Structure formats: C-alpha cells, structure tokens
Image (cartoon, grey):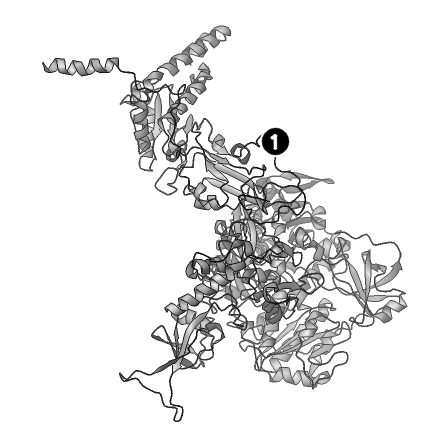
Amino acid sequence: MNIIKGFMTTFKHVLEEPVTLQYPEQVKDFEKRYKGRHHLRRYDNGLEKCIGCSLCAAACPADAIWVEAAENSDEERYSPGERYAKTYEINMLRCIFCGYCEDACPTQAIQLGHEHQLSFTDRRDAIYIKDMLIDAPADGQEATPRQVEAGVYTQSIPNMEDPS
Amino acid sequence: MGISSKLGNLGVVTTTLEQAVNWGRTGAMWPLLFGLACCAIEMMAAQASDYDMSRFGMELNRATPRQSDLLIVAGRVTRKMAPVVRQLYDQMSDPKWVVSMGDCASCGGVYNNYAIVQGVDEIIPVDVYVAGCPPRPEQLIHGILTLHEKIRGEHISDWAV
Amino acid sequence: MVTPVKEDTELVTINIDGKDYQVPKGGNLVDMAKWVAGNDIPVFCYHPKMDPVGMCRMCLIELGGVARDRATGDIQYNDDGTPQIRWFPKLQTACTQTVNDGMYIKTNTEQVKEGRESVIEFLLTSHPLDCPICDKGGECPLQNLTMAHGNGVSRMYFDDKMHLNKHYPLGDLIYLDRERCIQCARCIRFQDEIVGDDVLAFHERGRRLQIITNSDPGFDTYFSGNTTDICPVGALTTGDFRFGARPWELTEVPSISPWDAAGENISLSTRLDRDFGGKAMIKRVMPRQNEYVNEIWISDKTRFGHHFTRSDNRLSKIQIRKGSNFSESTWDSTFKAVAKTLKEANGSVAAIAGGSATNEDLYELAQLVTGLGGDKLGAWSPTHTGADLVAQVGLPEGSNLGELGAGDAILVIASDLEEEVPMWRLRLKTAQDRGAYLVVANGRNTRLEELATEDPNIKGRVVDGAAIRYEAGSAAAVMANLKKSNKDIAKKLADANHLVIVAGAEGLTLEGHRALVQSAANFLIDSGHAGKVNSGLLVPLPGANGMGLHYMGFSPETTQDIAANPPKVLIVLNAEILDDDPTAKTWLSQVDTVITLGYFMDAIARESKFVLPVQTFAERDGSFTNGERRVQRFYTAQGPMGDAIPAWKAVGNIAQAADLGRAKLSAAAVMVAIAKNVAAFEGITYKVLARTERQFPDVGGDDKYYGGNAYQNTGGIGKQIALSGTAKSEKVTVPDALKAGKGEIVLLPTTRLYDRSHMFIPTVMVRSRVSLPFVHLNPKDAKALKLADGDYAEVNYDGGSVRVRAVVSDDVSVGAAVFPRKLTEKATPLVPTVGTITKVTEPAQIEG
C-alpha cells in the first residue's frame, strides 16, 4: 500500500511542468532591488552626474572603486559643477555589489543595474573604466566633453532638478 | 609527447579533431565536489533542479580529484587552506580547468587581510573569474559557459606538454 | 620638550567642569583646557599661534570666579563650606580669557551646548555645503564641528543663500571661495602677525564682508600656503592641490624640506596616481609640527616646489659617454666601469658635493674618495663658508629660536633672509614681536630691513633704527669694527640675554665671508654669548645639508683648491657646477674624467663621462643636518623614477667594485657607520631621529578644529648635534673689497628664493613669480652708464655675458650692481666679480 502511495507522488510530478530554468536562453526576472553592475548616469541635458567626489570609493568596503578628479572648464565640460571624474574605475572582481556607493553618491550618479553576466578569462578585463560604466548619450544628447557658454554652469555642486 | 606529435601536421583533420575533442570536453565536464564558503551554497543551487547544471553535462560532482576536470574554487581561500587547494589541483588529471567563483577567490574580496590568499591565482592558474558576492547561479553558469567558449578555442597542443 | 610650563612658571588652579587643574598663569584658557584637561573647547577664529579676537563665538563657555567680599576681599563660602562661585550671567568666549587663580568654567552644560549649536547654525546659513567637491572636505574644522556640535537640520531656506565668487584667485597659488568663507580672519591675522606683511584685508561690511588682497601681484608673500592650512573651512585652497585627492585617501609621509638651511619639517601627502604609472605620487606638501624648527609653518617654495621630483627632465637612465654621444647602460656594468676609471687615476681623485646630498650620500662619497687615496672633498657652492665655526659657536643643544623674546638680540648681516632662508626670517620676525632687538645690516635695502627694531636713539647713515646700511662688500669690516663704528648697536647686542647672529655672504668673496663669520664668532665669544643656550651663530648655507657637508669633511675652501689644482677624476654629486659658475669651465677642462651623480642632465652632466641618476629626497630614506645642526630624517614617499637609486647606494656599490669593502644595504646602516666614525654624530641612529614628543601648542592629533591632519609629527623631531671644540676669538684680516676699474662695475650676486634652477623651474605654477633677470643699479652709476629704469643692459663678466633689464633705485649702494644668481638659463657670476654693463636697445633674450 505504501509503495503505491510513494509512486503516486512520483507520477504526480511526472505530469508537472519542469521547474528548471533554461538559462542562458531564459532569464529570470530579477527583483527591482537586485544589484548588478554599475552605471554612471547623465542628466537630461546629457552632462555627467558624477562630480568625482570619491565618496563612493570611501564608502566601498571592498576598495573596488578608483576615482581621480579634475576640473571642468567651459571649453571642456563634462559635468555641470566644478569637478568631474577624470578616471573612474570599478574592479568588478572586488565589488561585492552591496550598493553603498549608490547610497553615498550625493548626485545619484552611480546606480546599480541588473546586468549580472560578469565572467572574465583575464582579471584585467574585470576593471570597468569610465567609458564602459557611463550611459551612452541618449538620442539628441550631445556627448561629453563639450563646449558650453560661459556663465551657465556656475554652481559648485549642481542642483539635481536643474543642473545649470 | 602527446597526440599532436603522433598526428603531425595534418591540417584540416587536426582542426576537425580538435573541435570534436573540445566539444567532448565541454559536453561532459565533471567538477570537483568542493566548496570553501558562502559561494558553495550558490554552487549547490546551480546544481539543483532550478538551474540544473546537468544540462551542460555536469550532472556529477566527483568527490575525488582524480575523476574531475573542473575545479570551482567557491569561497575565500585561507592561507591554511591554500596548500590543500593546490594539492587537489595537482591531483587532478589533465586536461583540467579552474573557475574562480566570487570575489574572495578572485582577489580576496573584502577580506583584505593576512589570513586570506589575495586571489586563488596566486597558487593555481585560473581560467575564468566570476564576479559576485556570491555570484548567483546564473552568474556561475555564465562563467562556465565562458569557460566552454574558452575551451572551444583551445588547441590540442595546449595540453600536449 | 616644548611645553607652556617652564621651571620658573607660576602655576594657578582653575576648575574645569568640576575638576581642579594646575596651569601656568597667563596662559590662554582654550590652550590650557586642551593641554591639561584634554577638553576640546571648539574654536574657529582662535589659533594658538596668534592673538585671540573672539570673532566666531564658537568657544562660548560658562565662566565664573570665586566670590569675594567686596570690602574685605575674603572668599565667601557656602553653608557646606565650599567656596561660593559667582557665574557670569551670559556665556563668555573662552579664547579671550587668560587663566587666573580661582577661575571656574563649565563646558558641557545645556546652555553651552545650545550656544554652540546656534553658532554652527548661524555659520551655515550661507555656507554652500559643497563638501563633496571641496578640497578641505574630510579634514575641515567646520565639517567636524558641525558633526560634533551642530543640530543637523537647518531652519534656513537654501534659496536665500548668498552666491558669491567660487574660485577667485588671490594670487597665482591660492584660490579663495567667497561662499565658503566664515570670516574668521585667521589668514589676515597670519599675514599681519606672523609674517608681518599684511597683504590680505577685509573689504566691505556685514554680510558683504570679504577677503581681498591689496598687493600687486596678488597675495605677494613667500608664506601664502600656510593660510590654507589654518583656514577652518575650504575658503582658501591651493591651486597645486586643487581636486588632487580627497584628504582621507592620502598617505602622510614625514619628510624634510630639500631647499634651505632651515630644514622645515614637512609631511608629503601621497596617493597612487594613474598618470604617474600607478606609483605613489606627492599630491601636496603640508607642514609637520616641530616647534624647534618650523613650528607649524613652511614657505611656499617648500610647499609648491615638489614638482621637480617628477619632472620629465629628471635623469632616469644611466648615461655613459661614447665619443660625443651618450648611451644607456646597466648599474652592474657601470659600477665596474666607474671603479676601473677611479682606480686608474692613482689617487688623483676629488669630489664636489652640493647641499641637497644627504648625510648618508656624503659619508659614502667621502669614504670612496679617501679609500681611493684622494683627500679633496669640496662643498658646493663656494659662496658661503664658516660651517666649522657654526659647529663651535652655533646654537647649543636645546636651543629654540622660538624662545627668543624680550631682552634678547638678533643681528642679521649680509643676508636677505627672506630670499635665502624664509623660515628663519619668519621666526626672527616673531621673535622681534616678542621683544627681541632685531638688527639688520646689509649693503642694500632688503625686505628684512623694514623689520629691524625701530630705535629712536639710533640714527643711521641711510636708515634709522637698528638697521645698518654699509658700503657694498664691506660686511666683514663692519662686523669686525662693530664696536667702534656702531657703538650703540654693539652695546645692545653685547648686553642682550641671548644673542643670535646670522652671517650671510651677500657681496662677499669666500675669503670675505670667512672674515665676516670669524668676526661674528669673535663678537659672540667676547660678549660671553658663545655656548649659551639660545645664543649663537647661524650661516644661511646653501642647500638643505650645508652643515652635513661640513661634518662629512667637505669644505668650500677645498672646492677652490680643486679648481686651482684640478684632479684627474672628479666626482660631482648634486652640484650644478657649470650652471652656477661661469668661470668653472676653464678649470673643468683640465679634469680628465668627470663622474656626475645628479637629478638632471645639466651642463656638468653633459660634460661628464658617466652620468648616474640618483633619487631625490622624495623617493628614498635619508637625513639632512640643518643650519642649527639638527639632524632630521625623512622617509620614502614617492615611487621611483626610472633607474635612479639613492646616491649612497650608487657610491657604495662603486666602492665595492673598487674593492673598498662591501656596500651598505640601507640608509640606516650608513647612519650606523656615520655614528661610529664621525665624532659629532655619536649616538645618532634612525631610531633616535624618529623620536617624537608632545609639543605645545597642541595642534596636531585628533582635534577637530585646527584643520589639516598633517601637523602631527610622527616622523621624529630630529636631534641637535652638540657644539664641539672651543673656538677662540681670533684676529681677523679683512680682505680688501673688490675695486672696479674705469668703465667697470662690481657685480654682486644675490640669491633669489624663486629662481630658474633646474630644481625649481619644473614648478610651473610659481613660474610667473620668478623675477625676470635684472641688474639693480644706483642712480649715480646708472647715469654714468646712461641707463634708465627699465632699459635693457648687457652685463659682461668673466665667462659670459647676458642681456637683462636694468632696475635703477637708490636701494643699492654706489659702485656696485646687484645681479641675482640663477635668473637666466646662462651661468651668471657666483661670487662678486668685476664686470661691465652696457646699454642695449634690443630686447633681452629672456627665458621663462
């Protein structure tokens, strides 16, 4: 009798849909809060949000971020404020995707997205430089650096709603 | 020594043979049953039915290095564990590959201290590094697929020492 | 130890938060609370080095005193027998209080907390809060005190904030952010009180109050960088460090200024840098507190002059001459080749070393030369001498220029200290403020002359007060005959409690300077000051290690001897002989082989057979002996440049290749050998030099309000070498001053702080402050030469000629033209010489 009971369970499962996810053809929907690799964001006008303040690097528990800052000029402007990130690198092999950098960022420049396919055959490839991290300018946006009129961007730290 | 020296330069035949061999290697890769820390939990999940690594011919985790050809270093390697990891690697028979799973195995991760090996590639050659802390099963599988891709590009002469 | 408590200090009892403390009478309450009780009363405007002004109101405390009966003066007691305290009804500023007996203060009551909170909120009403991009962010007193005492929430609207100039250049080096300024006046007071050159001021009033500079060019002083250190907010920042790094990312490495005889203690803030190949790189230079040497100040040359260490022109590869070309080589083969050349010279080997070589380098070099049978060790440059007398009648062990004050006297003769050793000039100026009698004697007007004590009783030839203006070139005679020709001044000096004489070499030949220093030593010995603490002789020897040269056996007289009898092989270490001295090429051509160890491919390197790259102070360990004979060590800060190695290592390995014993493995090991073989260095090891002590005022450490965390001295305060030998008052023969023939004029070389030397020219941001080459003439001479102010003149001298601008004013004496060194790329006279000046119409070819 018990044997029949046991096989019943087995047969029941034979008829069920398999649970296996056919990765990589099928990808599960991640929770919104999932933290994948980082993106550096831009304002609507296409200027970079990052001001190179290094607070993300300071907050990083794994020492994965390297920032070197430089000064904007109206001839060569990257971000609306005085300062921009000349070098911005994240070592994906050090990063633990904790999101502290996102919390620390005063301009919401760095955000963790949902990309997760991060495997490397050479560890040097794991260092994502600024060009790889920053969003490409959207349609109609001018790329950075760009030349702007003098006197438009006068604030040291831009206002988030109206960066000029 | 090895097969290449016996075959000589046979052009098309070798290339095709290489492809066949590499296909065989990618299709039936047996990892060593071996975990070091939290990453091993995700590795188990990758083997369970949700992700089911046996789809890639990895249904068996061998409990002995002699029968394994893939070492997944899942977790931080302490200095004390380092000789053990190295011995396991040495005991595996060629051809063999190493996946460094997660930040700690790849570079010490947050454990930047004297007790942890700052990257398992200090002691054994690593083929693929998988980022994440710990990597999701998807990420591990992606790492293994990256390894497959790498293997498909290998030549017989690479292993014919 | 530098403490506020001396042997004869009267102590009083004060009560801080219910606990009694013994403190020296007359001390400042803020300092004393911190020193004895570790009670950090927060301040913005107060600084222990300057007078209190009570402007920021941050230091509010509850203040009270023991109640006394008005009629009898007896202490009134409570019923329980404790003395009655009479509290002020309102909060008082602690920084304006001097401690006295029976003072009671409370620093942690609700009222005090509320007071502090309100002050912070007030200061932040118009602060831009751009901390993320501010260079001060992370070590900012305003940030720290806001975190410690602020409310966290503001009741003010952001839109109402003032928007002012964000990045306003006060000078070439310092930038002002008017939004961040909290108007504490620390910078203004520093320029006024410490430097004595009030180039900063407040402008307008109330909310429009702002800092301006009233000099042209802006912020024209050699100490401007210090204002950025003491600025309690990010209002003043240096152009050099702008966005260089965040302060918390920096690694502080203790070091010593490589520029002059003061030996300023500095802290090199380093960080890895992508553009520097991922190596550690100096991002900024900060002062390190050493109350014996530089207190907490450094000169701008020290602060901004670090760029030469990473200059593209730095020698990074070994260069060996093959015919007229140079080819690169490796160290091992070079050591052997150099050793072979040296051995073949059969003892005809000499060395000339400059003042930027360390004690270790010099010792190893001396060992090599003597080991090879040579005995000539020359010091560069042969302009200043008298180091042997400084070793005998200098400032004794335990002296501190910061202790000079009322009743003491200082004589500065034949030196423009501001240009030669700015830190001494700063410390002597503050000594004068404390009441020391400062006498300035020179053949021309210098900026130091303004600081000479005003003395209505003394009438001078050109200037009144304690300033002597003598005929150019006659400094030695003036010093020798001081008692006769300047009786009043000589008496003041002789009667002073402590006497410091600074004897420069301006307008003097080497023989003349020897006579001057000997006369100065005689004066000290005759007046009984020799050997007394805080009294003695100082000579502004060129380079950071002028005294080290002496102790390791190098002397400028030997340099003259080497020039007179050139050896077969000459080793040159950190001495730009051909760039400095136009007459050197005549005797250098008689030297068979020149081996150069240096930083740059300079003129002497181009004439050498072997050119070996050596490391600067930034890349290696070592020690310098400063003008007060304090041996101070510095540490490796920056990543190496190419193949350069420390000079002691290069020399030691050459000696090893020449079978003269094994090369030492570390700088510390060389110091052990020095301690063993050089009597003056007995007992000195790197460990001794690394000793630190608690210093007053307490501005380093973990306090939240003196700004900059680099003040803390973790690298050691060094060790002053004891006086050795007993100098006697010797008869001095003053050599005749140079006489110009008909149509000729005496050219008097002077030193400028900012010049076009190989070491300083890579500091691009200061370049605009480097004076264009000029010759300074008296109107009488100018008239004879038909030159007007601003004309172009060609100066001809032994070994060359150069076209410069003429400056005409009666600041210089008749018959002599002041002609500063190293302002042109060409070599100009090193020592006084006779030359001609002719007017030219073509503009001068001026570099830089």
**In the drawing, does residue C631 fall left or right of residue C34?**
right
Q: Nearer the viewer, residue C181 or B128?
A: C181
Q: Nearer the viewer, residue C505 or C511?
A: C505
Q: Quadrant of residue C366?
A: bottom right
User: C128 above or below C436?
Assistant: above
Residue at mark 1: chain: A
How many residues crowd around disc 1 within 10 Å: few (fewer than 14), some, or many (20 or more)? few
Q: Quadrant of residue A73?
A: top right
Instruction: Say if residue C843 shows up in the picture.
Output: yes
The residue under the point 71% across, 46% down is C606
Q: Amino acid at mark 1?
A: Gly
Q: Quadrant of residue B80?
A: top left
The residue where tag 1 is placed is A140
Q: Nearer the viewer, residue C428 or C474?
A: C428
User: Measured from the top left, where is residue C404 in percent x and y?
Assistant: 56, 76
Q: Residue furthest left?
A: A1
**In the drawing, does residue C245 fall left or right of residue C573?**
left
User: Measured from the top left, where is residue C484 in percent x and y?
Assistant: 71, 85
Instruction: Say if residue C570 shows up in the picture.
Output: no
User: Measured from the top left, where is residue C208 in percent x and y?
Assistant: 61, 63
The residue under the point 53% across, 63% down is C631
Q: Secondary structure at mark 1?
A: loop
User: C731 above or below C639?
Assistant: below
User: C106 above or below B21?
Assistant: below
User: Measured from the top left, where is residue A81 in percent x and y?
Assistant: 58, 46
